[in-house]
Image: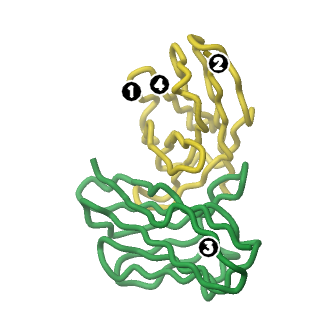
Chain colours: A yellow, B green
């Protein structure tokens, strides 16, 4: 059974810091991995999607890397801003583009002005 | 971009009543929809997968007679929580995917509180 772990559960940093959020998964036979952002009481916004054959994806200040063999992914946020405060969820898909996702519990990030 | 609309965003109901949650794809045909449940500080847990025109496939431990899912059209799926009880209080969220690019889009979620 696939398990996704995100540690720590919460993180507080001052504005401007570069930071790394970690995600690990137990079964390396994944189809893809996604990072999502969730604001309190809201839905999910997809940030980055990495296919199993890829090593990283970048979008603006965000960079996600994937090491499938070791079961790890990181989300790098450059020059953090208070608007980045949210919960960041990592999820893996194991069976194809339309298959179910297995989520981690998320990391709640607070960026202090 | 594609949008998935979920309603209501928040509902409070009495124990024993039924609640219907709607999930609509606004600008694409959602051939597959997923329903998730999220308890506070927990992961999103998949409840069921529905394909348009077919019966939903439920995850282990999810009661299909309690959580009724209908996906009768390519733009609408509904989740009905029947005879809701306080332990059903949770955040429910849908996601949808379909052609042409098969990307996955999430609704904004429904916070259900059962008194």
Q: Residue, x 61% and y 50% (percent of image)? A: A103
Crowd band around label 3 with a 10 angstrom C-alpha radius: few (<14), some (14–19), many (20+)? few
Crowd band around label 4 with a 10 angstrom C-alpha radius: few (<14), some (14–19), many (20+)? some
Q: Disc 2 or disc 3, which is closer to the eye? A: 2
Q: Is residue A97 left or right of residue B13?
A: left
Earlier in the chain: of badge 4 and badge 2, it is 4
Tag shown at residue A63 = 4
What's the chain of the residue with tag 2? A
Q: Is residue A86 above or below residue A83?
A: below
Query: Circle 3 — which element?
Result: loop
What's the chain of the residue with tag 3? B
What's the chain of the residue with tag 4? A
Outermost residue on the top side: it is A16
Tag shown at residue A59 = 1
The residue indicated by pointer 3 is: B59
Q: Position of residue B12 (x, y in %)?
A: 63, 70
């Amino acid at each position: 059974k696939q398990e996704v772990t995100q540690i720590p559960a919460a993180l507080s940093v001052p504005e401007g810091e570069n930071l790394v959020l970690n995600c690990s998964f137990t079964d390396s036979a994944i189809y893809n991995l996604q990072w999502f952002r969730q604001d309190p009481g809201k839905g999910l916004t997809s940030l980055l999607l990495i296919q199993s054959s890829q090593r990283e994806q970048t979008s603006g200040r965000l960079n996600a890397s994937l090491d499938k063999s070791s079961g790890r992914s990181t989300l790098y946020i450059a020059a953090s801003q208070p608007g980045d405060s949210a919960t960041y969820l990592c999820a893996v898909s194991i069976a194809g583009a339309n298959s179910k996702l297995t989520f981690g519990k998320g990391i709640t990030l607070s960026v202090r002005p | 971009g594609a949008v998935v609309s979920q309603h209501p965003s928040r509902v409070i109901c009495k124990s024993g009543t039924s609640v219907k949650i709607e999930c609509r794809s606004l600008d694409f045909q959602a051939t597959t929809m997923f329903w998730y449940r999220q308890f506070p500080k927990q992961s999103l847990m998949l409840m069921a997968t529905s394909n348009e025109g077919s019966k939903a496939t439920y995850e282990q431990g999810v009661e299909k007679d309690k959580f009724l899912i209908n996906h009768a059209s390519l733009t609408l799926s509904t989740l009905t929580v029947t005879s809701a009880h306080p332990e059903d209080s949770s955040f429910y969220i849908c996601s949808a995917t379909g052609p042409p690019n098969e990307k996955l889009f999430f609704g904004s979620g429904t916070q259900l509180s059962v008194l």
